[in-house]
Image: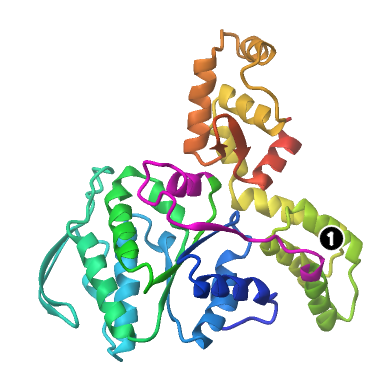
Amino acid sequence: MSQIDTWHFPRTEQANMLITALESGITNHLTLFAPRRMGKTEFLLQDLMPIAQKKNYIIIYINLWSEQEDPGLVIVQKLYEAILELNNRKHSLIKMLEPELKKIYMKGTLPFLGEIGTEVEFKKKKDPDAIGTINLNLLIDKLLQVLVDLAKNRTPLILLDEVQHLASHKKFLPLTAALRTALDTRKVKVKVIFTGSSRQGLLRMFNDSKAPFFNMSVNVPFPTLDIKFVEFILKKYYQITKKKLDLKLALQFFEKLHFNPFYFRNLIMKCLFHSMNLNDAYPLIESEISEENNFQGIWSRLDTLEQMVFMEIIANRNLYSVETLKTFSELIGEKITTQKVQTSLNRLIKLNLIGLEGRASYFCENDLFSDWVKINKL
């Protein structure tokens, strides 16, 4: 379990609510969505895990971004480590699944798995569409069954972080389908909490009728933090400095940061370590956000029409109106059709800058990027 830091703001009520929902039997799979840096992982590790462990759950935390090229490998690793922990074994499967290698043959007997002869074929760097995981999906299914057998009267709880990564490329479809089957087969005995930071990615995963995870999970709101969080952080600041920061001003900046706890804490750290006031520290945070996320680089890679389409979405205007198409055409110097606008929309979606909900409701994935565009480009 991760050590809880003194600046961590506990969300105990939310954690208890999720555990209660799983225990009630109303669902076995839950999904939490929030943009990046909103505290989902911290919540899982420092709030939910301790409560679940006290209730005797077996916790398996899996972050799919830790092995983006081969998410199946990290799933195998974490399931196997959970098995080893239950049996006090000290070696790890990951040593046999080095991602740098092209092929690894696992022959003979692995602890608790019996005789296997599985070939794991890794992706060739020259072929980005190579599937790359022969029989790895079967191994995941077997590991899950071993875990359930060893758990006895305890319940495995899988925390699958950044699950939308499975929808980022068609090469992950076999893995996603196999994982759905393995979990559905044991849906009473294995609980799962999915988290994601891409709204569009989660829509593709759980709302697309053709997707393997269609209707698999119940969406649960991940509430934004409020004045209690700001008061908590300002109290910590006062305990160290014996100086008070203005609560009203701090709340205004927290709102400007779209209630992002990571960047708000960074704002207070600027005040703490550089003896700055909030008004002087905030522009530094804005600059750091822009540089850290490479907003200028993202914007520069868009062509003129893509930039204009993005700005129209920010302004919540009709992309296909006669007036809008006329404006596009005049500014670009060529006739812009609805088909060209749709092509730009598709690329913006592919770049995870916007998303589509329903038939024609577009939204911006990153509010901080939208703010940067409004300030610097509109």
Residue 309 image position (x, y, % from top left): 61, 26
- Identify residue type, mark 1: Leu
Q: Nearer the viewer, residue 374 or 194?
A: 194
Residue 353 in view (yes/no): yes
Q: Is residue 155 above or below residue 161?
A: below
Residue 373 image position (x, y, % from top left): 69, 37
Residue 184 on the magenta span:
no
Residue 29 image position (x, y, % from top left): 46, 63
Residue 97 in view (yes/no): no
Q: Residue at x 41, y 49 (%)?
A: 214
Residue 172 is left or right of residue 138, and the answer is right
Q: Residue at x 50, y 71 (%)?
A: 22
Q: Magenta part of the protein: which range?
A: 200-229
What residue did someone put label 1 on? 251
Q: Check disc 1 and report its element: helix, strand or loop.
A: helix
Residue 270 image position (x, y, % from top left): 76, 66
Q: Residue at x 24, y 60 (%)?
A: 137
Q: Is residue 115 above or below residue 169?
A: below
Residue 266 is left or right of residue 355, and the answer is right
Residue 340 is left or right of residue 241, and the answer is left
Q: Is residue 291 above or below residue 120?
A: above
Q: Nearer the viewer, residue 108 or 83?
A: 83
